[in-house]
Image (cartoon, rainbow, N blue to C red):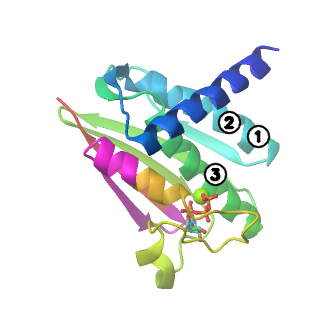
Amino acid sequence: MDLIVNKSTYLSNTINTFRDFVKNEKVYKQINVIEEIDQAVNIVKTVLDDCNIELINKIESDIVLSMNMVSGELQQVIINLVNNAKDVLIENKIKNPWVKIELSNTPNLLKISIEDNGGGVPTEIRSRIFEPYFTTKHQSQGTGLGLHICYKIIVESMQGTLKLENTDNGANFLIELPHN
Ligand SMILES: Nc1ncnc2c1ncn2[C@@H]1O[C@H](COP(=O)(O)OP(=O)(O)OP(=O)(O)O)[C@@H](O)[C@H]1O
Ligand SMILES: [Mg+2]
């Protein structure tokens, strides 16, 4: 029951976040970043569990950091990135699939990285993945808006950067958020 209530609240919040996002009515407030990230991780954990994908959680809970941001937006980014990882891990039928979420903080920069062992983004499409409507998935599977929205949230809403690096394992999406 708790799970159902949590998920429904999340879905309801998602609709609000998306509506405000589209309307550009953003309400900024001081938010505990670790709590915000934890909530996103809890949501994706269930999805990854169902798909037998290991979640390697490298979030140190002793980071205390409040940032001025729009509630729900950073969660959307994390959920989108993990969902993309899940899709590629299933599509490529990866053995022992995993998604790793890492966090590190310096006096003025928070870094979040989300890596998977799905093989990475093919070189020929790397320059296009943040474009709206760019997708390699069937139209019933993807809209191609996920990464575009992530980019807009991180860069425009949060004044940060979002970059893709391919690693030996797969794709690694690196978020950097400046803070005081
Ligand atoms: N972790 C990843 N590994 C490999 N390719 C990826 C990864 N994440 C994204 N991509 C590629 O980038 C494309 C664009 O991603 P994006 O999230 O914008 O759209 P989508 O996942 O196809 O659809 P949507 O997110 O709207 O449901 C994907 O179709 C996929 O080809
Ligand atoms: Mg996506």
Q: Quadrant of the C terminus?
A: top left
Q: Nearer the viewer, mark 3 or mark 1?
A: 3
Residue in the image at 41% along x and 77% along y: 127
Q: Name the residue that disc number 2 marks.
A: 45
Q: Which residues are magenta?
A: 152-171
Image quarter where ligand 1 lies: bottom right
Kind of residue sitting beneath label 3: Asn
Q: Position of residue 30 (x, y in %)?
A: 31, 19
Counting the numbered discs, the total is: 3
- The residue that disc 1 covers is 49
Cα–Cα span, label 3 and label 2: 11 Å
Spot the residue most to the bottom.
124
**Mark 3 sits on what residue?**
83
Residue under the image location 29 percent in, 26 percent down? 67
Q: Quadrant of residue 119?
A: bottom right
Q: Nearer the viewer, residue 24 or 143?
A: 24
Taking 76 as reference, is 27 left or right?
Answer: left
Instruction: Tell me: is circle 3 under 8 Å from ligand 2.
Output: yes
